[in-house]
Image (tube, rainbow, N blue to C red):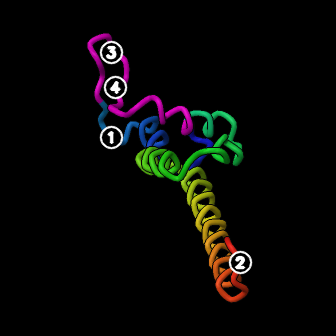
Amino acid sequence: LNAAGESFFSGLLSGNFGVQHDAKGNLFIDRDPKHFRYVLNYLRSQCTNSGLENETRSKLNTILLEAQFFAVDPLIEEIQARIQEMDRLEELEEKARSRRQWEAAVYNRSV
């Protein structure tokens, strides 16, 4: 859990802040486990290819919030880079679409 450097987990293991426990004495972290799996998988593998390449922008933003909560900076950077790449591709697609519309208008063709 310390492999990602300073994070929620390194602080947790250092004992620098108090944590909640459930009735059985288990550590309680009030977060959605559905999205935590991305954080956990990253921490397990330290792999920059953590299964994010096929996720939607909406899901990436949700996973980004989890990575930010847990302060896993390498994962945050990976998600932000993926979102930036999506933005770049969308911009290129929009330019191509505009170009096709312009050509259609100039040459009187259908799009």
Residue 25 part of the magenta segment: yes
**SS assignment at label 3:** loop
**SS assignment at label 2:** loop
Label 2 or label 3, whichever lies nearer to me, is 2
Going by the numbered disc 4, the residue's amino acid type is Phe
From the viewer's perspective, is residue 46 above or below residue 91? above
Q: Nearer the viewer, residue 6 or 97?
A: 97
Mark 3 = which residue? Answer: 25
CA gap, disc 4 and disc 3? 9 Å
CA gap, disc 1 and disc 2? 66 Å
Marked residue nearer the N-terminal end (2 or 3): 3
Classify mark 3: residues with Cα within 10 Å, few (<14), some (14-19) or many (20+).
few
Label 1 or label 3, whichever lies nearer to me, is 3
Mark 4 = which residue? Answer: 28
Going by the numbered disc 3, the residue's amino acid type is Gly
State the extent of the magenta-drawn residues as a range: 20-39
Classify mark 4: residues with Cα within 10 Å, few (<14), some (14-19) or many (20+).
few
Q: Nearer the viewer, residue 21 or 96?
A: 96
- Horizontal relation, residue 62 to residue 21: left or right: right
CA gap, disc 4 and disc 1? 13 Å
Going by the numbered disc 1, the residue's amino acid type is Phe
Marked residue nearer the N-terminal end (1 or 2): 1
Mark 1 = which residue? Answer: 17
Disc sitting over residue 109 in the figure = 2
Going by the numbered disc 2, the residue's amino acid type is Arg
Marked residue nearer the N-terminal end (2 or 4): 4
**SS assignment at label 1:** loop
Residue at 36% across / 31% down in the picture?
Answer: 29
